[in-house]
Amino acid sequence: MTSLRTPSVPAGAAGFVPALEGMRALAAGAVLLTHVAFQTGQVNNSPVGRVWGRFDMAVAVFFALSGFLLWRSHARAAWTGAPSPSTARYYRSRLVRIVPAYLVVVVVVLTLLPEARGAAPETWLANLTLTQVFVPFSLTVGLTQMWSLSVEMLFYLLVPVIALLLAGLRGPRVRLRVPVLIAVAAASLGWAWLGGLLQVPRGVNYENWIPGYVPWFVAGLILAEVAVAPIDRFRWVRELGARRRLCRLAAVAVFAVVATPIGGPVTLDTPAHWQFATRMGLGGVLAFLLLAPPVLEPRGARMRLLDSGPMQALGRWSYGVFIWHLVILSSVFPLFGVVPFHGRMGYVAVLTAVFAAAVSAVGYSWVEEPCRVALARWEEARRPSLPPARDTGAADQARTAIPATASP
């Protein structure tokens, strides 16, 4: 085993990290479970019910994972002087990765799901354009989880802007990047109070706008900065990340705190401002603790469960699980004669997970992967006409995490 006192290159410094694919699978499973728990009536103020409800904190992991993967190339450019990633290529990659499979689900739900048929034109438009968080009452049955994808899509759009804003923090000022990110995350905790001053239309929840989730994304940005920085920087953070057991125990402790009333209600009740701010702050810490080991452990370290074949497959299908699981859950109840909010959580969870995995595997093979391959071929066909340059952000952009949802 590599000594913690020996400087080493972190696993997340460059390239594909298999354990992160497995972590994505676990997060998708947690999101599915929290929704099944809610729909079967198991989410309540009992200790067990609060735990099921707080599995929605898996969203923090998804947001931080996206932040890490999409920011890594920008951090590398700042710390090493490597070329910055192509903005145009980045946007193409995000569009092709997210939109085709998403549009399939939206059309299927709004045309075939009985509870969602007959949606108003503005509901169609909001869901097709991923602007649900800004349009009143546009989160419909089978698609309510898409609020988080709407938030994450806005983050995707802002990544190059954030990189531009921090462009001056290079050279002697590069050491200020992490403190600045921490300060921004801390300041964003005031969104619960500031957003409450806005006059938003009825049916719009300002807490579901991106300013509220800055700490979750910043957790990933900081991991990216630490991973690509010279090995003599952030040494204590890397040593912390290499201590798997310590990080896991700390993550369990943070989760336990969030699962108490300190983290706010686990039902659809509106949290107090301080509860929302606390959950956002602790969510960033939780995501950092869970992602630090696979990102910051020395390159070559193995994580048996997360690196396993089944977890890798489920990680590849996790986006499909996210976008399909609620419509599948809605269909399981009538198809198998289960009454919503009347128990049988284990039975419903197994059925939902099996069908979600199957549909996601098909969607990955028929929609997601063909679209990705088509984009790669198109880019390759254009390559001779482009100036020869190494796009250091291409690998990061191709393997980005997909969000899940926190809303039952």
Image (tube, rainbow, N blue to C red):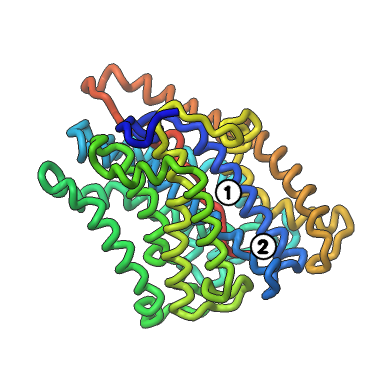
Left or right, 168 with reference to 351: left
**As drawn, which residue projects farthest toward the right?**
337
Amino acid type at circle 1 is: Ala
| Quadrant including the C terminus | bottom right
Res 124 visible: no
Specify whether 324 is left or right of 218.
right
Residue with the mark numbered 2: 52
Which residue shows up at 32% across the image and 31% down it?
Answer: 6
Q: Disc 2 on helix, strand or loop?
A: helix
Rendered residue at 69%/40% (across/down): 357
Q: Quadrant of the N terminus?
A: top left
Q: Residue at x 40, y 80 (%)?
A: 196
Relative to 304, does residue 336 appear above or below in the rendering? below
Q: Secondary structure at mark 1?
A: helix
Whole-angstrom CA distance, mark 1 to mark 2, is 13 Å
Quick check: 165 left or right of 275? left
Q: Closer to the N terminus: mark 1 or mark 2?
A: 1
- The residue lying toward the viewer, choosing from 86 and 50, is 50
Front position in the image: 109 or 221: 221
What amino acid is at disc 2?
Trp
Dot 2 alpha-carbon crowd within 10 angstroms: few under 14, some 14 to 19, many 20 or more: many
Q: Position of residue 328 (x, y in %)?
A: 73, 51
The spot of residue 33 in percent (x, y) is: 68, 55
Instruction: Please give the label number shown on residue 27.
Output: 1
Total numbered circles: 2
Label 1 crowding class (10 Å Cα cut-off): few <14, some 14-19, many 20+? many
Q: Is residue 214 above or below residue 157?
A: below
Provide residue 188's location: percent of width, then percent of height.
Answer: 34, 67
Q: Residue furthest left?
A: 172
Residue placed furthest toward the top: 384
Q: Residue at x 49, y 73 (%)?
A: 205
